Image (spheres, grey):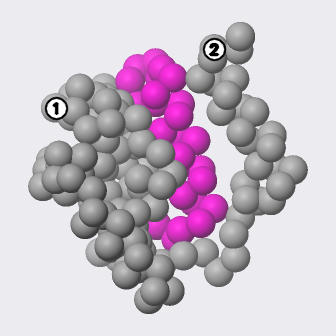
């Protein structure tokens, strides 16, 4: 685990500062910390959700299968001051419409942030990481991205 963390930190350090500008950005996100004091992964979706919003929701499902972090998904109408779509960990911006990653997060982007924060992992990987389920899950994500075409 420690070796993986060192490798993750080294990989992040190798990236340019512009690519990881989110590390210096934070916003007031409601519910960013839960009652136990843990940072919450927050997904802000447009009303109604579009392709990037649905993609971020799928990333949240993947994260839930690998990490033990609280997750909340909020419609933009409940947080009018925040960009949609967007993804936050605590108050820290990961992706936002018109900003970093144009509001579209990936599993790896979020996982890197969680690893840097020493977020606890699930004791065993969830069903999404089993081969058959993963195949179906990836097909669903492709259908979402292409609009069923």
Which of the 4 image quarters holds residue 130?
A: bottom right
Quadrant for the C terminus in the image: top right
In this rendering, the answer to whether 75 lies above or below 16 is above
**Which residue of the protein is positioned furthest toward the top in this rendering?**
149
Left or right, residue 84 beside residue 115: left
Q: Residue at x 12, y 55 (%)?
A: 24
Task: Say what secondary structure mark 2 lies in.
Answer: loop
Question: Which one is closest to the eye, mark 2 or mark 1?
Answer: 2
Dividing the picture into quadrants, the one containing residue 84 is top left
Label 2 sits on residue: 147
Q: Is residue 75 visible?
A: no
Other-residue count near label 1 (Cα within 10 Å), few / some / many at <14 / 14–19 / ≥20:
few
For marks 2 and 1, give the CA distance. Answer: 29 Å
Image coordinates of residue 96 in percent, x first then y, are 28, 35
Magenta span of residues: 45-71
Residue 145 percent coordinates (x, y): 59, 23
Specify the label residue 45 is tagged with.
Answer: none
Locate residue 51, reporting x and y percent.
51, 23
Task: Identify the residue at image location x=38%, y=24%.
Answer: 46
Image height of 104 relative to 4, above or below: above
User: As drawn, which residue projects farthest toward the right?
Assistant: 132
Q: Which mark is residue 81?
A: 1
In terms of secondary structure, where does tag 1 sit?
loop
Please indicate whether residue 44 sits to the left or right of residue 62 in the image: left
């Amino acid at each position: 685990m420690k070796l993986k963390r060192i490798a993750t930190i080294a990989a992040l350090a190798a990236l340019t500062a512009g690519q990881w500008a989110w590390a210096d950005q934070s916003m007031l996100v409601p519910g960013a910390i839960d009652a136990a004091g843990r940072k919450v992964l927050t997904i802000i979706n447009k009303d109604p959700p579009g392709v990037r919003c649905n993609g971020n929701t799928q990333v949240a499902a993947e994260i839930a299968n690998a990490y033990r972090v609280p997750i909340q998904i909020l419609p933009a109408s409940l947080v009018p001051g925040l960009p949609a779509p967007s993804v936050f960990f605590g108050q820290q911006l990961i992706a936002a419409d018109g900003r970093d990653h144009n509001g579209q997060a990936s599993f790896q982007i979020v996982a890197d942030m969680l690893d840097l924060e020493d977020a606890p992992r699930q004791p065993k990987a969830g069903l999404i990481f089993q081969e058959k389920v993963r195949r179906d899950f990836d097909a669903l994500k492709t259908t979402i991205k292409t609009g069923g075409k």
